[in-house]
Image: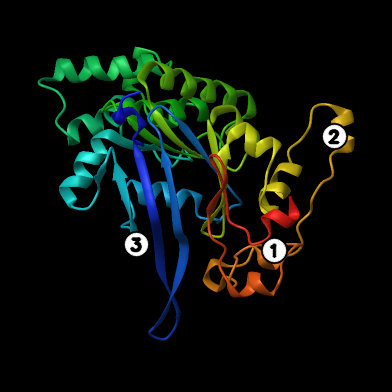
């Protein structure tokens, strides 16, 4: 393996994204949507990012692409930090996003041809109209849409077809890295499998690298090489998909995995469901120390005083918990 292949395509180091929220007359308070998150993604790999609603998964994806300006930390793409506006413009030719809601992410006033062709227009990626049209039809064919769909509008399509239009738009500039923000959560279950299989095929064909954000662990396990678990803006565990599924270390990950339905009735009966007490705290008033301590059955005084370090416990398996050795 060459040194270039060993280097991660995307490196995220101590990423922070805080939003100032008005809490009274001329008073603001930072909402820590993403708080000191670090990870890397190798070329051609899929990293799944899971967690409860509101844990900061989507914000991580958007901040990496600089749709939100990072409050702190850095994003490094192929060894080069993304800092200036020109860095961001260059980065966006190589990195893009598939949005969660295929209904609101497509402009209702534009034809399918114009929606898919918009990135080509912005980055001036064609010499003439014939070349533009040829590229649009090629993209539509890649995602399973017919050429006669080109002149129609988004509202004329089903949810699954709209998401295919969104994926075709994301592929327009031949990107290397795609943030998939819950791309199947708004679709029927029967359509979900088709779209996930399409993501797999496109990855194989085009050598794509994905950050796959979702809350459905079964979907994430199917498509991901590694899985990262977030809770209240912080990363709590990261490991290979099979490893995190069969051997979760963090109490929060254990709870998530215990909720996954088992097809085998015997296994399902033997499976002990770990139910967490209490509700997820507000990121505006996050607990001191470990963010999970208010719902954790193993929490001690140290957990309230000290933020646990996100460290490598075994080869490639990272977790953030003070009591890992005692509870595993």
* Upstream in sequence: badge 1 or badge 2: 2
Residue 232 quadrant: bottom right
- Residue 121's label in the rendered image is none
Q: Give the SS element for disc 1.
A: loop
Residue 279, percent from left and from top:
69, 63
The numbered mark, 3 or 2, whose residue comes first in the sequence reads 3
Q: How far apart are marks 1 and 2 (CA)?
A: 25 Å
Figure check: 22 above or below 150? below
**Disc 3, disc 2: CB below 8 Å?**
no
Residue 129 rendering spot, x and y as whole percentages = 14, 20
Q: Distance between the residues labelled 3 and 2?
A: 44 Å
Disc on res. 279: 1
Mark nearest the camera among 1 and 2 is 2
Q: Name the residue under label 3.
A: 72
Q: Which of 274 and 141 is in front in this view?
A: 274
Q: In the image, 228: left or right of 169?
A: right
Q: Distance from label 1 to label 3 (Cα)?
A: 28 Å
Which is more foreground, mark 1 or mark 3? 3
Q: Which residue is drawn at 54% across and 31% down?
A: 224
Kindly check if marks 1 and 2 are in contact, taking CB atoms under 8 A apart as contact: no
Q: At x 82% / y 46%, what residue is drawn?
A: 273
Q: Can residue 238 be seen in this view?
A: yes
**Dot 1, how many residues are within 10 Å of its Cα: few (below 14), some (14-19), or many (20+)?**
few
Q: Quadrant of residue 171?
A: top left
Residue designated by label 2? 268
């Amino acid at each position: 393996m060459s040194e270039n292949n060993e280097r991660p395509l995307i490196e995220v180091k101590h990423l922070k994204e805080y939003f100032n929220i008005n809490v009274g007359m001329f008073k603001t308070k930072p909402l820590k949507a993403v708080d000191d998150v670090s990870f890397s993604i190798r070329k051609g790999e899929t990293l799944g990012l899971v967690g409860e609603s509101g844990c900061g998964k989507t914000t991580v994806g958007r901040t990496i692409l600089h749709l939100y300006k990072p409050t702190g930390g850095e994003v490094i793409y192929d060894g080069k930090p993304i800092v200036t506006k020109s860095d961001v413009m260059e980065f966006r030719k190589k990195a893009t996003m598939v949005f969660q809601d295929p209904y609101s992410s497509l402009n209702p006033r534009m034809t399918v041809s114009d929606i898919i062709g918009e990135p080509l227009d912005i980055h001036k990626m064609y010499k003439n109209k014939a070349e533009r049209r040829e590229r649009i039809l090629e993209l539509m064919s890649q995602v399973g849409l017919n050429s006669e769909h080109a002149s129609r509008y988004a509202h004329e399509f089903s949810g699954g077809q709209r998401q295919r239009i969104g994926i075709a738009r994301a592929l327009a500039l031949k990107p290397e890295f795609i943030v998939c923000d819950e791309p199947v959560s708004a679709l029927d279950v029967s359509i979900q499998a088709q779209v996930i299989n399409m993501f797999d095929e496109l990855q194989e064909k085009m050598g794509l690298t994905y950050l796959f954000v979702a809350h459905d662990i079964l979907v994430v396990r199917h498509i991901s090489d590694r899985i990262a678990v977030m809770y209240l803006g912080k990363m709590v565990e990261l490991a290979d998909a099979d490893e995190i599924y069969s051997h979760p270390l963090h109490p929060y990950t254990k709870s998530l995995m215990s909720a996954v339905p088992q097809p085998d009735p015997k296994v399902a009966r033997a499976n002990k469901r770990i139910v967490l007490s209490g509700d997820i705290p507000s990121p505006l008033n996050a607990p001191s120390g470990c963010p999970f301590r208010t719902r954790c059955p193993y929490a001690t005084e140290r957990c309230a005083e000290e933020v646990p370090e996100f460290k490598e416990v075994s080869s490639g398996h990272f977790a953030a918990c003070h009591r890992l050795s005692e509870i595993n």
